[in-house]
Image (cartoon, rainbow, N blue to C red):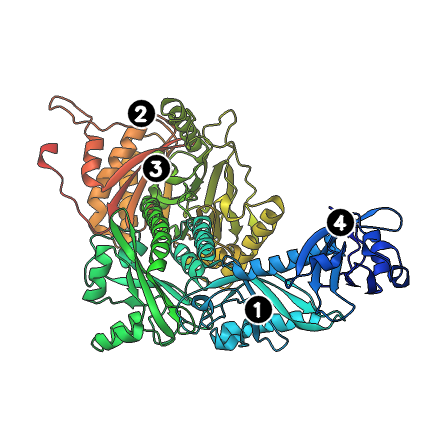
Amino acid sequence: MSPTTDRHDAGAGPARGGPVVFVLDGDGTVLRCTAGVLDLIGRTADQVRGRPMAEFAATPGPWDRAADHLGSEPLELHTTLRHRDGTPVEVDAEVLPLPAGGEARLLMCAAPSAAGRRWTEDQSLIRALFGQSRIGLVVHDTELHTTRANLGSEFFGIPLPAKPWQHTPGRDLRSILVPEDAAAIEKQWRRVLRTGEAVIDWEHSARRLKAPDQERILSSSAFRLEDNHGRAIGVAAVFTDITEQYTARRRLALLHAAAARLGQTLDIARNSEELTRILVPDFADLACVDLVEKVIQGEDPGAFSAGTPLRRIAVAPGGGAWPAEMYQRGDPVHARDLESDALRDGQAVLVPDLADLGKRLAPDPERQRLLFPEVAASALIVPLRARGRVLGVLGLWRGRDRLPFGVHDVPLAEEIASRAALSVENSRRYTSELRTVETLQRSLLPPAGVEFTAAETAGTYVPAGTAAGIGGSWYDVIPLSSTRVAFVIGDVAGHGLGATATMGRLRTAVQTLADLDLPPEELLTHLDDLATRLAYTEPQPDGSAGGVVGASCLYCVYDPVTGRCAMASAGHPPPILTSAEGRTRHVNLKPGPALGVGGMPFEPIELHLGPGSVLAFYTNQLVAHDETSSKSLTRRLRESLHAAVEAGGSPADIGRTAVDRVLTEPAADDIALLVARVRALPEGSTVAWRFTADPTVVGQARELVTAQLTAWGLEEMAFTTELIVSELVTNAIRYAGSPIGLRLIKDKTLICEVSDPSQTQPHLRRARLTDEGGRGLFLIAQLARRWGSRYTPSGKTIWTEQALGAVPEIPLDFF
């Protein structure tokens, strides 16, 4: 029995001290007893000596007529003694017979039943703990040698005695576990010895020296053992093998990370990089993603075969830099037949020992760069396969200080690779859609740089970073009659393919209306009517009016002969003007309502531009964010344009500089910027006359025209030009009246204009043989390369264009 300091027991009433030894004679009289009898029955040793034991016992026992109970074996019994205060005291007793020949015949050791029961329970608990095999229990001394353990040699790799709770020959952890695992555990146990602070549920690796390639994870709790004086005598550790749970938990964590992080973007490169970051360092020490070139371009990868071009699009080293001897990020990758066949079959390739594989394969520098980093000992190559097509390959490597890849790693890698392949495929399809929309958008825009007599222009189009952001931002430069030019910029509400198609329709409508030579405000009125009609006749599937309603457009006409510039806006911000003198400001144009909204007229503005003035038309997305940043970006755009114009760059340079300075991050919406530097016709390139509606002026007009063409060195064009002027002036005299204007413009073509006060448009027709007239416009159409008419504030102007130096043939059937 073991002494105890407990004073109470939950099931047997108050405890009565510790064990007491009684020495009895043959009659059962107490000869001697220990001092603990006072605590047990409330009497001192002197009060007990010389008195029969039966006086202190509540039940009969071997002390009654002790000589009759003598034998050779000890006797264990449970009995009740009587305390001095009358309360019963239950005790567990062991009675030993003493050798004959002396006065003392019995030796009885009695202890309170509660203390004995606890001592028995303690012994049973220790035996149970060391006897079971589901929970590990190890006791170390202060030198961390193993003194007791409950698991056999298959666990520790050392022999244990039949009763391991008694004693285990001391061995340190380094003779059982691999050095790095043993060192980590010893560090923790020494801290427990030093501080007395327990370690609870610490998860750690515990690979055995006998099987270092087998991963084993333990969950341990350790506490310090102390003697009765509080001095450390060792460390006890309780542990369970959680390798399976740890593997399952790690698998779930990786799958959860893959589900949460893959596919969050539609960028192929970022998805690939995210895949490598998920796997390194938790699953591998090195990871890379090689994709088929066509996939990166957004195209269908087609059938995978040997020689299919791949490109390394993402790498992730566990620590430090990516190995220099391997393919680097961005490099084209060349897979050999062996690797290509494995990828085409869609099966993962497991290489537990790279050194062994290297010995079996013929030396090949390309294969070395593909499969054999110097720091790696094992590899796992997994194809990225989605919808029956191989999109690329995921390469994984582990170093020599880590367990090599095994068959249990393949399903996890394949499942994560499958998720990644779907995200890459979605990204590829999105990239294809993005490029389709962007290609359509760009195909609907004019050339970036256009040069006319009236102006030198350059357009800048910046697509949005996503297909959802690409909308209907557009610009146009339209040549008009008489060397004039129209600048157009607009933006369609909405995004995507529908907005791009709507933009194309509006641009076509503007070009058609521009051919009528309408003033800006009238052209926008017609365009607004078209937008309203389209909204009612072609609603969207969801019942909405579509992107045509709410679209914005600014239309500007510049005349290089007069320097006159007229513009009007339908919900579009005014352009920024840098005058020939170097002053930069926003044009004081009040935008009207957006297209399709209606209800308000479009107010035009007219200004005079000197040669060299620069107009910058932009869509609102270039500067439109929140209210505060919009003001700042608008000011930055104005300052950037001013600085670029002062630097003397071309319109293309000015546009690039402005966009680079204002657009500091990828655009959420597409952006258009049109920069135009206006010009004036050279001096002496234009001449004009005014006539009254008198038939005699027709001959005078012919003479003036002939003289001017001679001065310009275009004598060979005199005859055809005289015919054109004669017909146009004659028609003006006959149908319109005074005043009649005649103007010649020498440009890349010879332009002839006749103006009159009538707003009746001429019509081309073929005269019959019996008709006396009606052949004038038909003749003009045969002589001129182009001809047309436009309304003016005071009437109309009929104009013709002839190629310089060209003398057209007059058809014989005309006469």
Left or right: 21 in relation to 774: right
Give the x, y percent position of residue 567. Answer: 47, 39
On screen, residue 292 above or below 721: below
Tag in front: 1 or 4: 4
Cα–Cα gap, marks 4 and 2: 154 Å
Cα–Cα gap, marks 4 and 3: 112 Å
Amino acid under disc 2: Tyr
Q: Residue under label 1, please give it.
A: 166
**Which residue occupies the foreground of this view, 568 or 482?**
568
Amino acid under disc 3: Ala
Whether residue 12 is visible to the viewer of this picture, yes or no, is: yes
Left or right: 41 in relation to 656: right
Cα–Cα gap, marks 2 and 3: 44 Å
Q: Secondary structure at mark 4?
A: loop
Displayed quadrant of residue 786? top left
Q: Residue under label 2, please give it.
A: 735
Earlier residue among tags 4 and 2: 4
Q: Secondary structure at mark 2?
A: helix
Q: Quadrant of the N terminus?
A: bottom right
Cα–Cα gap, marks 1 and 4: 38 Å
Give the x, y percent position of residue 521. Answer: 46, 33
**Which residue occupies the foreground of this view, 274 or 121?**
121
Tag in front: 4 or 2: 4
Earlier residue among tags 3 and 1: 1
Q: Residue under label 3, please give it.
A: 501
Displayed quadrant of residue 541? top left
Q: Secondary structure at mark 1?
A: loop
Amino acid under disc 4: Pro
Amino acid under disc 1: Gln
Earlier residue among tags 1 and 4: 4
Q: Residue under label 4, please give it.
A: 60
**Which residue occupies the foreground of this view, 469 or 457?**
469
